[in-house]
Amino acid sequence: MILVLRPIILLLALASTSFALTEIRSIPTRPGITMNVLMMTPEKAGRQEALILFPGGNGAGPFKITESGTVSGWSFLVRSADTFIESGFSVFTVAPPSDHSTGMSTGFRESPEHADDIVSLINFLIQQGYERIFLVGNSRGTLSAASLGTRLKDNHLKGIILTSSLEYENFLRWLPLNQIHLPVLMIHHRDDACRVSSIEEARITRANLSAATAVDFVEVTGGAYPRSAPCDNLSAHGFFGAEERVVRVIADWIDGRNVPDKIE
């Protein structure tokens, strides 16, 4: 089935000249349901990698448009969108679907309905010629990425990237992680002080994932002095001050290069 996409807002040119297209589209997913997606593609086409980004929190309002026409957002992933673009990747940030417009619960992120919504986006990306698609989650968005990794089997999916992942004991342990066979990259800040996202719990998740698939784990140190609470985005939890180094690791991993155990 060919998807009919309805543009919502066409953004003005960004300050960075790396962008060829930046727009928000409403994608029909399940019957009567739509999902807004912020689509950002580089000026120079050529690469066929698409990153589907899942911000944390409840996912509501993950991006906005400033008066000057630039994109802003609180998530590490949205803040780093221009750096991803400069590396040649196209990025697609998802917002909650229309039947969960106030936010996505833990249960919904693990649900078949969430998977159906993302399948619709993946089908669109395939129609646009993207051959390699990656699921990238941050904080609570890692629950989406991991859950989808247990459900989706499309050959265009090439990997899962978990940044500042939720703790294993109270969240990820309830997923059938042994059904994830895509390679996984985990990136976690050593000083992440969020109560549901410690690096010790991230290492437990790595151990459980490693029983079924290849997992690269990168520990981050350094960055800027926090300007938010520990579970918010301008802290170690959001790689505040270390964003470019983290994106560089993600780009190297996607390109098949070896990634370090630690970055400082």
Image (cartoon, grey):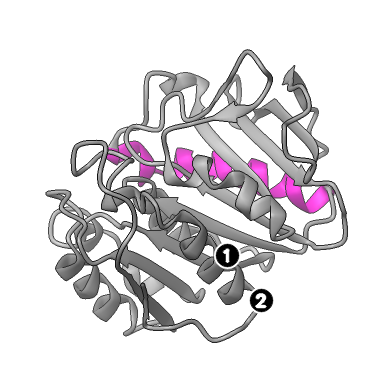
Residue at image location 65% in from the left, 26% down from the top: 70
Does 12 sit above or below residue 199?
above
Does 244 sit above or below residue 114?
below
Residue at image location 38% in from the left, 69% down from the top: 186
Q: Within 10 Å of the Cα at label 2, are there few (<14), some (14-19), or many (20+) other Cα atoms?
A: few
Q: Nearer the viewer, mark 2 or mark 1?
A: 2
Residue for badge 1: 153
Q: Work out whether residue 83 or residue 142 is closer to the camera in this orientation and state it.
A: 83
- The reply to whether residue 237 is in sight is yes
In this picture, residue 173 sits left or right of residue 238? left
Looking at the rendering, the stretch of residues picked out in magenta corresponds to: 106-127
Residue at image location 22% in from the left, 42% down from the top: 231
Residue for badge 2: 255
- The reply to whether residue 213 is in sight is no
Does 76 sit above or below residue 179?
above
Q: Secondary structure at mark 2?
A: loop
Q: Within 10 Å of the Cα at label 1, are there few (<14), some (14-19), or many (20+) other Cα atoms?
A: few
Residue 174 lies, in percent from the top left, at: 22, 58
- Point out which mark residue 24 bears: none
Can residue 116 be found in the magenta stretch? yes
In this picture, residue 254 sits left or right of residue 164? right
Q: Secondary structure at mark 1?
A: loop
In this picture, residue 181 sits left or right of residue 30? left
The mark tally for this picture is 2
Q: Amino acid at mark 2?
A: Asp
Residue 45 lies, in percent from the top left, at: 87, 55
* Residue at the limit of the structure toward the top, as seen here: 67
Question: Can you tell which quarter of the image residue 50 is in?
Answer: bottom right
* Residue at the limit of the structure toward the front, as seen here: 225
Q: Amino acid at mark 1?
A: Lys
Classified by dominant secondary structure, the portion drawn in magenta counts as helix
Can residue 183 be found in the magenta stretch? no
